[in-house]
């Protein structure tokens, strides 16, 4: 099982980080979690065929986690996707149908008129809204379960357990939430929200705006040290910090984890790949376009 961080950023735009998204690859199949701006490009840079992205999970429907969905919905279909299943909190169906029947209806009517079949776009598509907690999805390779966490809107953490025994947990955006530790018990890789840094927030919005942002967002996000405490309580094998605003000192974020968690800790970067079995982490260089 492999985790690929596609987007490690946050709402403030960052030329080095796409908005949140992650991919789990197991046994030749791929499972996408969140679809922020830049996800489609990062998938291609990770050499993932867009037609193969047929199963998508949303932790929540904030813009930074979902603005890339329209591009992937259309682009993956154009490049050959013929079926799609999408899972997420209540509101997901409204997002999906608004894109298809309102915002891009004329565009899609035109493209369907070019002769490409509707399968994977308007047919052979299943949208499932998740409530409570439990199992979201299962196939012969993985079982995916979910748990509500604490954020400003309905948000879900996901756990991906492979038949091989490997596992990855994706926290979604959340405040410190000890039930997440039990949910993540013994996982190989915990990808955890660690957006909060007072100095980074000040840099992103100016001193007064940063102070307000810190006060409000600290109630619905996790600091690196809090993420480390969850990893330790979960007895996770490793921790990946993500959801960084511009100006975050990632070295300091990792250092803040050390008093609480003694396993491997990585600051997420776009296209970072981690093997859940060996815990080998591989940064993938982003291609540079030649002119």
Image (tube, helix red, strand yellow):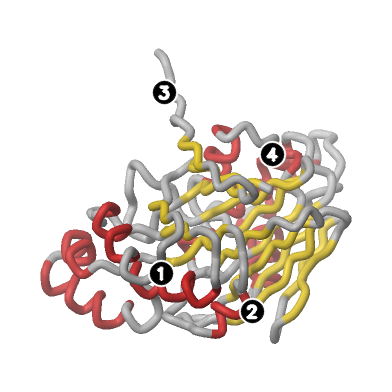
For this rendering, which residue is in front, 154 or 26?
26
- Residue 147 has which mark? 2
Mark 3: which secondary structure?
A: loop
Look at the numbered discs 4 and 2 and tell me whether their residues touch, using CB distance below 8 Å.
no
From the viewer's perspective, tell me whether residue 282 is left or right of residue 90. left
Q: How far apart are marks 1 and 3 (CA)?
A: 34 Å
Look at the numbered discs 3 and 4 and tell me whether their residues touch, using CB distance below 8 Å.
no
From the viewer's perspective, tell me whether residue 16 is left or right of residue 172. left
> Most extreme residue toward the front, as rendered?
262
Q: Earlier in the sequence, mark 2 or mark 3?
A: 2
Residue 147 image position (x, y, % from top left): 64, 79
Closer to viewer: mark 2 or mark 3: 2
Residue 27 occupies which quadrant of the picture?
Answer: top right
- Residue 50 has which mark? 4
Look at 52% across and 57% down and name the residue there. Answer: 67
Q: Distance between the residues labelled 2 and 1?
A: 19 Å
Q: How far apart are marks 2 and 3 (CA)?
A: 39 Å
Residue 106 image position (x, y, % from top left): 68, 50
- Residue 288 has which mark? 3
- Residue 228 has which mark? 1
Closer to viewer: mark 1 or mark 3: 1
């Amino acid at each position: 099982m492999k985790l690929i961080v596609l987007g490690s950023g946050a709402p403030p735009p960052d030329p080095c980080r796409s908005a949140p998204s992650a991919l789990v690859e197991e046994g030749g199949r791929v499972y996408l979690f969140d679809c922020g701006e830049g996800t489609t490009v990062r998938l291609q840079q990770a050499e993932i065929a867009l037609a193969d992205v047929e199963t998508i999970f949303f932790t929540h429907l904030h813009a930074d986690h979902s603005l890339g969905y329209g591009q992937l919905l259309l682009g993956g279909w154009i490049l050959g996707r013929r079926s799609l299943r999408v899972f997420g909190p209540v509101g997901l169906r409204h997002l999906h149908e608004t894109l298809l029947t309102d915002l891009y209806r004329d565009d899609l009517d035109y493209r369907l008129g070019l002769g490409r079949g509707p399968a994977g776009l308007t047919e052979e598509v299943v949208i499932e809204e998740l409530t409570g907690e439990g199992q979201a999805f299962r196939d012969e390779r993985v079982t995916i379960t979910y748990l509500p966490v604490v954020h400003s809107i309905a948000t879900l953490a996901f756990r991906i357990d492979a038949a091989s025994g490997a596992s990855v947990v994706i926290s979604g955006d959340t405040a410190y939430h000890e039930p997440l530790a039990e949910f993540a018990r013994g996982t190989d890789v915990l990808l955890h929200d660690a957006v909060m840094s007072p100095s980074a927030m000040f840099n992103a919005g100016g001193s007064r705006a940063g102070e307000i942002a810190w006060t409000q967002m600290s109630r619905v996000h996790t600091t690196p040290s809090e993420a480390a405490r969850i990893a330790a309580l979960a007895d996770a094998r490793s921790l990946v910090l993500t959801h960084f605003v511009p100006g975050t000192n990632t070295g300091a974020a990792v250092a803040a984890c050390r008093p609480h968690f003694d396993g491997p800790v990585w600051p997420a970067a776009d296209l970072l790949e981690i093997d859940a079995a060996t815990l080998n982490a591989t940064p993938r260089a982003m291609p540079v376009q030649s002119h």
